[in-house]
Image (spheres, helix red, strand yellow):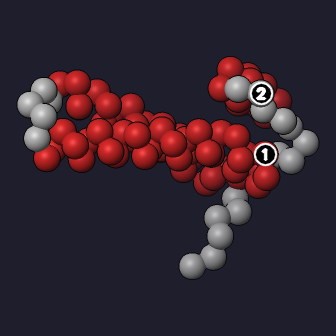
């Protein structure tokens, strides 16, 4: 399997990690009883947010836009909004 190199697909992958983490976290809150399902949803939520963090800081900088340096999640959100405005 080859590496993912398309910036659009890379961004979609990052967004899906964020959605997956958010949804599993919400389900975790709604699914109260701590059992095997609770543990699985918690692990999935943590893993997804870790992957999103990696995506936001490493993948974007090294594979999508090497000229931009991120200083935090707010900087990343600004970058996404500015990139969207530049396309218009």
Where disc 1 sits, the SS reads helix
Q: Is residue 34 above or below residue 50?
A: above
Query: In the image, residue 8 lies at what x, y percent?
Result: 66, 50
- Please give the name of the residue rendered at 24% of the width and 47% of the height, measured from the top-left corner: 40
**Up-down: is 71 above or below 38?**
above
Q: Quadrant of the C terminus?
A: top right
| Viewer-closest of 12 and 62 | 62
- From the viewer's perspective, tell me whether residue 36 is left or right of residue 76: left
Eyeballing the image, is 83 above or below 41?
Answer: above
C-alpha separation, residue under disc 1 versus residue under disc 2: 11 Å
Taking the image as shown, residue 61 lies to the left or right of residue 10, namely right
Residue at 13% across, 27% down: 32
Query: What residue is pinned by disc 1?
Result: 61
- Mark 2 = which residue? 71
Q: Nearer the viewer, residue 53 or 22?
A: 53
From this viewpoint, is residue 88 visible? no
Disc nearer the start of the sequence (1/2): 1
Q: Which mark is residue 80?
A: none
- Secondary element under disc 2, as helix, strand or loop, is loop
Quarter assignment of residue 53: top right
Q: Residues within 10 Å of mark 1 (few under 14, many from 20)?
A: some
Q: Is residue 53 visible?
A: yes
| Image location (x, y in percent) of residue 67 | 90, 42
Residue at 53% of width from left, 46% of height from top? Answer: 51
Q: Residue furthest right?
A: 67
């Amino acid at each position: 399997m080859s590496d993912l190199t398309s910036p659009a697909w890379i961004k979609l992958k990052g967004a899906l990690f964020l959605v997956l983490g958010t949804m599993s976290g919400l389900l975790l809150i709604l699914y109260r009883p701590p059992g095997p399902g609770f543990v699985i949803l918690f692990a999935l939520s943590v893993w997804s947010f870790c992957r999103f963090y990696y995506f936001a800081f490493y993948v974007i900088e090294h594979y999508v836009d090497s000229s931009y340096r991120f200083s935090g999640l707010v900087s990343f959100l600004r970058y996404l909004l500015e990139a969207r405005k530049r396309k218009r």
